[in-house]
Amino acid sequence: MSRTSRTLLPLVALAALFVTLAPATAHADRTRPVYVGFGGGPYVLFDCCSVHGRLSGQFGWHFGGTDIGFVMAVEAATTLGPDYLMFMGGLRIGGDIEVTGDQDFAVLLRPNGLFAGGFIDGNGAGFQPQGYFLFQPAFDIRLAFADRAVVFWMRPAAFDVIVSWDRPARGDWHVEGAYLAMAGFDIHF
């Protein structure tokens, strides 16, 4: 046996062992409870302005140890446009319900809600910067691929209920609403 053969034979055997065992391990492991996600879409504040855009990022985890069931995520989002700039951070709580699927692909539904606080600067819309609290009921349709590690999601309808101390001229509580539709992706690990 030549020196090259003695060096290559253990490497080939190790590679064959890895290729044989790696897929079996990946298919047996369905525990991907943690994820990072990003999304964006149009945003319409009902009593003001033109359509703006919202970008968001999430870091979330499923408490059951798999990719279904109760989920909690920390979310940060910004809304950009010609009339105002909004920034918020909060906690999204919901549950992933598996409609159909196997280890490789799944269709999931996620009813959820966001509780957040933020800041809006509306100089383009004629009002002063102010803080606000927000509640957002939402519903997601989720498609999981690639051993359920990559999830594409659509949020066809979500409604922001924004509560703030009204502009200094009136000095009372102000409640307003907004509509948004978003799409994005999550990476589960």
Image: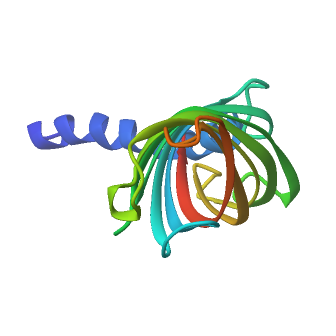
Q: Residue furthest left?
A: 3
Residue 54 vs residue 7, the one in the foreground: 54
Of 167 and 159, the residue lying toward us: 167
Left or right, 27 with reference to 100: left
Q: Residue furthest bottom?
A: 50
Q: Residue at point 49% right, 62% down?
A: 40
Count of all numbered marks drawn on residues in the image: 0
| Quadrant of the image containing the C terminus | top right
For the point 52% across and 40% down, which residue is it?
58
The image quarter in which residue 2 lies: top left
Say above or below: 138 vs 154.
above
Q: Provide residue 155's location: percent of width, then percent of height.
A: 68, 63
Identity of the residue furthest to the front in this view: 169
Residue at the (28%, 38%) spot, across then down:
11
Left or right: residue 122 versus residue 162 is left
**Whether residue 50 is situated above or below residue 96 in the rendered picture:** below
Horizontal side of 119 relative to 75 (left or right) equals left
User: Can residue 98 be seen by looking at this rendering?
Assistant: yes
Q: Quadrant of residue 180?
A: bottom right
Q: Relative to the observer, which residue lies in front, 125 or 120?
A: 125
Q: Position of residue 136 (x, y in %)?
A: 71, 47
Q: Is residue 19 above or below residue 33?
A: below
Whether residue 189 is visible: no
Give the quarter of the figure containing the N terminus: top left
Q: Where does residue 100 sit, x and y in percent of width and height?
A: 87, 61
From the viewer's perspective, is 27 left or right of 167? Answer: right
The one nearer the camera, 46 or 4, is 46
x 39%, y 46%: residue: 128
Figure coloring: rainbow
